[in-house]
Image: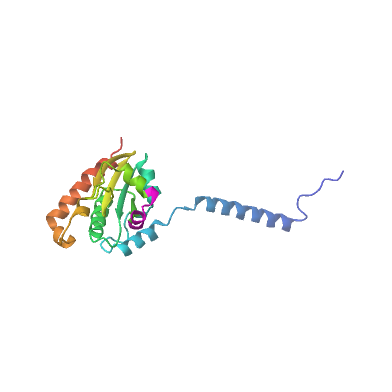
């Protein structure tokens, strides 16, 4: 029996081999593409909401499920805030500055305003998980207020900061954050974030 040729002629052979090489190259290229969220665009979106924070910031957008996931056993730094809160802008700026200086790779940003207003179930679970830290109002309702920073290492909360979220009256961030108070806040962040970054 006559053996069947794989290629009819040399031109066909060259075309098939060339196509094969191109497909292998494409396969390798696609395998190397990073399909993660575009963190640069997220950072720019964040700085458009918080003008004291530079475009090249560490913030990535998260939701209640992401925060709960961190609290249930992972590690992460979470800023719970929203743009209409007058204290959030400065707090976000100071946290980003300290975290950047210590080599933190990202900060999870959760705008929880609508979830809190709607008593979203996952948000309520976050509050319950943080019941040791979250303040209780005069009506006995426990909630989280903006801005709040939570630092979690392997599921353990090693830092919970919400001191400006409970300031009442006419004090503004510009009055509160003099040079001294800025350094105090940054030092508090530095100590906890240094612990967070420590390799065990």
Compared with 180, 159 (above or below) is above
Q: Position of residue 174 (x, y in %)?
A: 16, 62
Occupied quadrant, residue 39: bottom left
Residue 22 is left or right of residue 7, and the answer is left
Q: Position of residue 58 (x, y in %)?
A: 32, 54
The residue at the point 18 percent across, 51 percent down is: 185
- Which secondary structure dominates the residues rendered in magenta? helix
Q: Residue furthest top?
A: 200
Extent of the magenta region: 113-122
Q: Nearer the viewer, residue 51 or 135?
A: 135
* Quadrant where the image shows the C terminus: top left
Residue 74 is left or right of residue 175, and the answer is right
Q: Residue furthest front?
A: 139
What is the number of callouts on the image?
Answer: 0
Q: Tell me, what colour scheme is on the image?
A: rainbow
Residue 65 is left or right of residue 186, and the answer is right
Q: Nearer the viewer, residue 33 or 5?
A: 33
Residue 38 is left or right of residue 54, and the answer is right
* Quadrant where the image shows the N terminus: top right
The residue at the point 26 percent across, 56 percent down is: 92
Q: Is residue 141 magenta?
A: no
Q: Position of residue 38 (x, y in %)?
A: 42, 57
The residue at the point 53 percent across, 50 percent down is: 31
Compared with 127, 10 (above or below) is below
Q: Position of residue 97 (x, y in %)?
A: 25, 54
């Amino acid at each position: 029996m006559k053996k069947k040729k794989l290629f009819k002629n040399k031109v066909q052979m060259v075309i098939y081999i060339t196509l094969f090489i191109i497909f292998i190259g494409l396969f390798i290229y696609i395998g190397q593409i990073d399909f993660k969220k575009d963190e640069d665009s997220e950072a720019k979106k964040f700085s458009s909401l918080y003008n004291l924070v530079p475009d090249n910031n560490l913030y990535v957008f998260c939701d209640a499920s992401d925060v709960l996931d961190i609290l249930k056993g992972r590690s992460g730094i979470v800023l719970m805030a929203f743009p209409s809160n007058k204290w959030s802008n400065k707090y976000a700026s100071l946290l980003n500055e300290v975290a950047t200086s210590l080599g933190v790779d990202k900060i999870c940003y959760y705008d929880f305003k609508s979830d809190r207003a709607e008593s979203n179930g996952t948000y309520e679970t976050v509050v319950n998980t943080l019941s040791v830290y979250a303040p209780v109002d005069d009506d006995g309702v426990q909630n989280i207020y903006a801005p709040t920073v939570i630092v979690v290492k392997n599921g353990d909360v090693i830092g919970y900061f919400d001191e400006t979220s409970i300031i009442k009256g006419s004090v503004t961030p510009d009055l509160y954050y003099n040079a001294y108070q800025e350094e105090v806040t940054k030092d508090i962040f530095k100590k906890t974030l240094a612990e967070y970054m420590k390799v065990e």
